Image: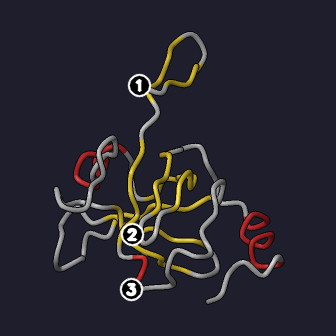
Amino acid sequence: MIDAKKGGDKMEAVQYAAITGLNHYYGASFLKPGLAVQLVKDPDNPYDEEAISVEISPIGKIGYIANSPNTVPRGCKSAGRIYDTFEQRTGGIVRFVFKDTAIIELSPNTNEPDFILFDVLAKGKWKG
């Protein structure tokens, strides 16, 4: 089954990607569905020339978009598949959170609203 969103007169397929490496930063416990994130190309990454970091302001980097056959869940795009679809930054919305992985919906028109993060912090759900 393919998710689709109606955009004007055409249907656009919804694209998903996985955030990995969360345990190397702040963990996944503070991530909640609906939280906006920013995807930022990381061309100087020594391990992956198509690396895309995931950031939340004012925290900073929280992980990377999965780019290995071992880390990309079924139904998600790898960093390599989305790397050339945006200039330097694009947005995403957290949709699902698992033990050490979060699934985001790619959302290029998403500006990271600080009030969403503030709401998470104010409710004491982030333990950074």
Is 83 displayed left or right of 128 in the figure? left
- Give the quarter of the image for residue 2: top left
How far across and down, in percent of the image, does residue 105 sit?
Answer: 50, 46
Relative depth, front residue between 69 and 115: 69
- Residue at the disc numbered 3: 24
Q: Residues within 10 Å of mark 3 (few under 14, many from 20)?
A: few
Please give the label number shown on residue 95.
Answer: none
For marks 1 and 2, the one nearer the N-term is 1
**What element does badge 2 sit on?**
strand
Circle nearer the viewer, 2 or 3: 3
For marks 3 and 1, the one nearer the N-term is 1
- Residue at the disc numbered 1: 2
**What element does badge 1 sit on?**
loop
Q: Residue furthest front?
A: 99
- Vertical placement of 6 versus 3: above or below? above
Q: Circles 2 and 3: CB distance less than 8 Å?
A: no
Q: Residue furthest top?
A: 9
Q: Residue at x 60, y 68 (%)?
A: 31
Q: Residues within 10 Å of mark 2 (few under 14, many from 20)?
A: many
Q: Which quadrant is home to the N terminus? A: top left
- Give the quarter of the image for residue 120: bottom right
How far across and down, in percent of the image, does residue 36 sit?
Answer: 62, 58
- What's the amino acid at mark 1? Ile
The CA distance from mark 1 to mark 2 is: 26 Å
Q: How is the protein colored in the picture? A: secondary structure
For marks 2 and 3, the one nearer the N-term is 3
Is 88 displayed left or right of 34 in the figure? left
- What's the amino acid at mark 2? Ser
- Residue at the disc numbered 2: 53
- What's the amino acid at mark 3? His
- Give the quarter of the image for residue 69: bottom left
How far across and down, in percent of the image, does residue 64 sit?
Answer: 36, 69
